[in-house]
């Protein structure tokens, strides 16, 4: 397919195709869209990518992404410092913040324990979490990893490290989605919904 395309265009399509969730057709569509942009817009687009790549790094405390030493959440004086919600990825922080129901701290693992993919505990920011719990007078750690085999394994592994420190370790309740019918829910989801029930 690249034989009848300009090499620069083929390379651009290939780069878009490497992005997660972008197939060959979407990559081609994005490449042609970028080519149709005014030169200053294309330059701003490429500069934004390079700037983010150069300046974004892990927060010194919670390992979320930031362009400063500490992220805005860790800097805030209005957050409860005694509770930490542990998530897999920075995008999970965004999802939880959108609920406007959580006003404590976060810790981003940057993945989950997955031996099949060659990811062990040392490749995640677990040591940093244990240090925070020891040093910051943390009372509760909420495990908000995904409800997958790897997410559950990671949550259990971390809870075993933290329990001896005298901290309360909780897990997000999982259950029936709003608007969902019981008949379509699987057994694990129903069991989780029963376990996580609360008083009305």
Image (cartoon, rainbow, N blue to C red):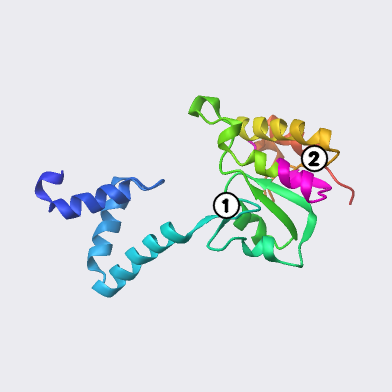
Q: Which residue is mark 1?
A: 90
Q: Earlier in the sequence, mark 2 or mark 1?
A: 1
Q: What secondary structure is marked by label 1?
A: helix
Q: Is residue 97 above or below residue 108?
A: below
Q: Quadrant of residue 94?
A: bottom right
Q: Is residue 170 above or below residue 37?
A: above
Q: For the image shown, how many numbered marks are present on the structure?
A: 2
Q: Residue furthest right?
A: 199
Left or right: where 42 falls relative to 120 = left
Q: Is residue 6 above or below residue 2?
A: below
Left or right: where 90 falls relative to 41 = right
On residue 169, the disc is 2
Residues shaded magenta? 130-147
Q: Position of residue 193 (x, y in %)?
A: 76, 39
The residue lying at 78 percent from left, 48 percent from top is: 135
Which is nearer the eye, 97 or 166? Answer: 166
On the question of residue 102 being in view, the answer is no
Query: Do callouts 2 and 1 mark residues in contact (Cβ within 8 Å)?
Result: no
User: Residue 137 colored magenta?
Assistant: yes
On the question of residue 142 being in view, the answer is yes
Q: Position of residue 151 (x, y in %)?
A: 63, 35
User: Residue 193 colored magenta?
Assistant: no
Q: Quadrant of the N terminus?
A: top left
């Amino acid at each position: 397919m690249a034989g009848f395309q300009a090499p620069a265009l083929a390379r651009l399509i290939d780069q878009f195709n490497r992005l997660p969730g972008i197939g060959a057709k979407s990559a081609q569509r994005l490449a042609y869209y970028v080519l149709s942009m005014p030169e200053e817009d294309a330059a701003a687009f490429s500069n934004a990518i390079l700037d983010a790549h150069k300046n974004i790094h892990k927060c010194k405390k919670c390992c979320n992404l930031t362009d400063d030493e500490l992220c805005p959440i860790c800097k805030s004086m209005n957050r409860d410092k005694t509770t930490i919600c542990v998530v897999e990825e920075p995008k999970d922080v965004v999802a939880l913040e959108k609920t406007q129901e959580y006003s404590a701290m976060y810790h981003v693992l940057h993945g989950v324990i997955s031996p099949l993919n060659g990811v062990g505990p040392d490749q995640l920011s677990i040591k940093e979490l244990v240090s925070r719990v020891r040093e910051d007078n943390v009372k509760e750690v909420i495990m908000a990893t995904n409800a997958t085999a790897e997410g559950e394994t990671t949550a259990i592994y971390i809870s075993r490290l933290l329990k001896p420190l005298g901290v309360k370790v909780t897990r997000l309740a999982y259950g029936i989605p709003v608007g969902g019918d019981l008949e379509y829910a699987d057994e694990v989801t129903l069991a989780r919904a029963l376990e996580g029930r609360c008083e009305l």
